Amino acid sequence: MSEVKLAAETRTEFGKGAARRIRRESKVPVVLYGHGTEPVHLTLPGHELQLALRTPNVLLSLDIDGKTSELAIPKAVQRDAIKGFLEHVDLLLVKRGEKVTVEIPVHTEGELAPGGNLLEHVLSALPVEAEATHIPQAVTVSVEGLEAGASVLAKDITLPSGVTLAVEEDAVVLQVLQAQAEEAEGEAAEGEAAEA
């Protein structure tokens, strides 16, 4: 798991006007909370934070005002709906060795059985519990040769050592659906031929 170091500054101004000023300086307003402590209001460098957030569940090492260092993971990210820039980020304070519950992306590999079937991601991200400093970036599931009606359950997915499911074992993660578009086209063609 990647750990990204960022310089953080505490902030004392709040509200929309203050947030706009922070964003004009290419920084992002952030709130760090967790472990029963009072929330800490920070600003982080916008570009570096944007790059760091490309990695799911990235571990951020925050150097706060050059005095203290804290570890955090992203909890909620707000982006501008049109331009996509970061508007606000909530970070969750974590400690080395602590277990956290996060969602990790589910990637697939392999080809389905022939027949034009469709693969549905019932869960695009898998809830797991892992040590804060060892969160996997993703899990990969083989769908090689799966036929219509087949499902991959949470318990069928091989997780890295030290990572456990935070969802019911029988939860459906992936399922293969029978292709219906071709059948519908075929039936429509038959119907038109009968009418003619």
Image: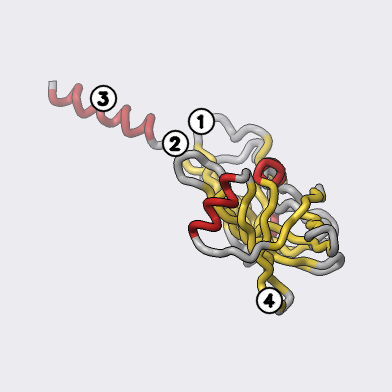
* Residue 124 location (% of width, % of height): 58, 50
Residue 38 image label: 4
Rendered residue at 56%/51% (across/down) = 21
Query: Depth check: 194 or 120 in front?
Result: 120
Disc nearer the start of the sequence (2/3): 2
Secondary structure beneath label 2: loop
10 Å crowding of disc 1: few (<14), some (14-19), many (20+): few
* Residue 66 location (% of width, % of height): 84, 58
Residue type (three-letter) at the residue carrying disc 4: Glu
Labels 3 and 1 touching (C-beta < 8 A): no
Residue type (three-letter) at the residue carrying disc 3: Ala
* Residue 84 location (% of width, % of height): 52, 41
Above-or-below relation of 101 to 29? below
Disc nearer the start of the sequence (4/2): 4
Labels 3 and 4 touching (C-beta < 8 A): no
- Report the coloring of the rendering: secondary structure
In the rendered structure, the answer to whether residue 52 lies left or right of residue 131 reads left
Disc nearer the start of the sequence (3/4): 4
